[in-house]
Image (spheres, grey):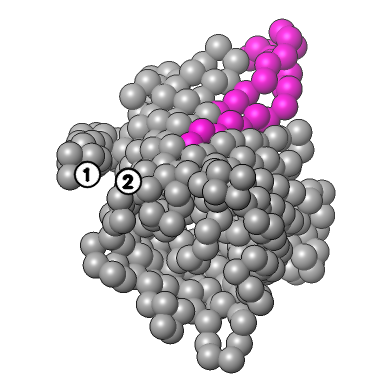
Amino acid sequence: MYKILRIYLFTALFFTNALTISGQGGRASYHFLDMTSSTTAYGLGGINISTVTDEINIIDQNPALLGPEFDRQIGINYMRYIGESNFAGIRYATRINDRSAWSVGMQYFGYGEMKETDASGAINGSFSPKDMTLSSSYSHDITDRLRGGITLKGAYSSYAEYTAFALATDLGINYFDPDRDLSLSAVVTNLGGQIKRFNESYDRLPIDIRLGWTQSFEGLPIRFSITAWNLTKWKLPYYDTSDSSESTAPVKESFTSNLFRHLILAADLVPSEKFHIGIGYNHKTRTDMSNYARDILSGFSIGASLKVKAFGVGVALSRPHTGATTFMLNLSTNLYELTNQS
């Protein structure tokens, strides 16, 4: 077990020092690394690093949510995203011993078919851009209530004749008090950099620091969550198009605006261990959409899951703007429970 931990930590430190430092210039790219495969997280606003659940895909939010309880569990996911985009993936997790666990996963991001043109605008054919990730996660219980985790990710992109490859690391920690149903988490995501570039320019990874709180209260079968993200920068200005009489939309960047664009608010009803339904609100998603492209549902998401014996199913919906309704599906099974049942 300690040999595995040393390998993960050595690799993480190598990428953090060698790749992140060398890639401080350039523009941020590889934002597909932030797209969750979990219906639980997607229904709770798109990002949630502190909800403790047995849904296997939640591991992509925080490797410290992985644990020995994920014993021989496998999950597949599918998402119909905006336009012709379709995402899908598979993940497997299993225990190593009473305090450690390991997981491996793969995700595919397809964006449909696009026309390929030259500099003059002449159409030369079509291409299908795509991204892929391979990931491996490891977690270890530091104490009875404190758990740490690490994820190593390889990201491959192919856009027509251009390809690129990057390596990234997520580091996470979670404190869980079952007596108070209190969960506190911290995650640093996407430490690393490009190994192969599209061209001569360098694209940075979307490094982020995130904090999360989730808790239920006595007598209420409802968990409340607050997730703070984009903490590597305070100012998150956006164009306020609410006043259509102005020729130029003003930039809004007040203290209150910046604060709420860093927060995701969520609540989920958990009447039993077999069923949950959650709702989330992401203020940044809502304010990123111009008034004419959003409605009352923009920024909100909803998800639900049901487990029957060794099988689980989860669904989540979101409507970022009036022209798009996104849908996510999770299917999972616990091979350990399945074997014992048979």
**Magenta: predominant secondary structure element?**
strand
Q: Quadrant of the C terminus?
A: top right
Instruction: Say whether residue 337 is left or right of residue 290.
Output: left
Measured along the vertical axis of the image, is residue 157 above or below residue 285? above
For badge 1, the amino acid type reads Met
Say which mark, if any, is on residue 183.
Answer: none
Residue indicated by mark 2: 96
Residue found at the far top of this picture: 124
Q: Quadrant of the N terminus?
A: top left
Return the residue nearer the eye: 125 or 64: 64
Q: Position of residue 67 (x, y in %)?
A: 39, 55
Return the residue nearer the eye: 183 or 237: 183
For badge 2, the amino acid type reads Ile
Q: Position of residue 201 (x, y in %)?
A: 39, 25
Q: Are marks 1 and 2 in contact (CB under 8 Å)?
A: yes
Q: Which residues are magenta?
A: 105-131
**What residue is drawn where x is 63% and y is 36%?**
88
The stretch drawn in magenta includes residue 115: yes
Residue 196 quadrant: top left
Q: Circle 2: is it few (<14), some (14-19), or many (20+) Cα within 10 Å?
A: some
Q: Position of residue 165 (x, y in %)?
A: 41, 24
Q: Position of residue 319 (x, y in %)?
A: 75, 56
**What residue is drawn where x is 55% and y is 78%?**
224
Instruction: Say whether residue 148 is left or right of residue 44.
Output: left
Residue 32 quadrant: top right
The stretch drawn in magenta includes residue 120: yes
**What residue is drawn where x is 54% and y is 20%?**
158
* Residue 249 in view in this figure: no
* Mark 1 secondary-structure assignment: loop
Say which mark, if any, is on residue 1.
Answer: 1
* Mark 2 secondary-structure assignment: loop
**What residue is drawn where x is 72% and y is 14%?**
126
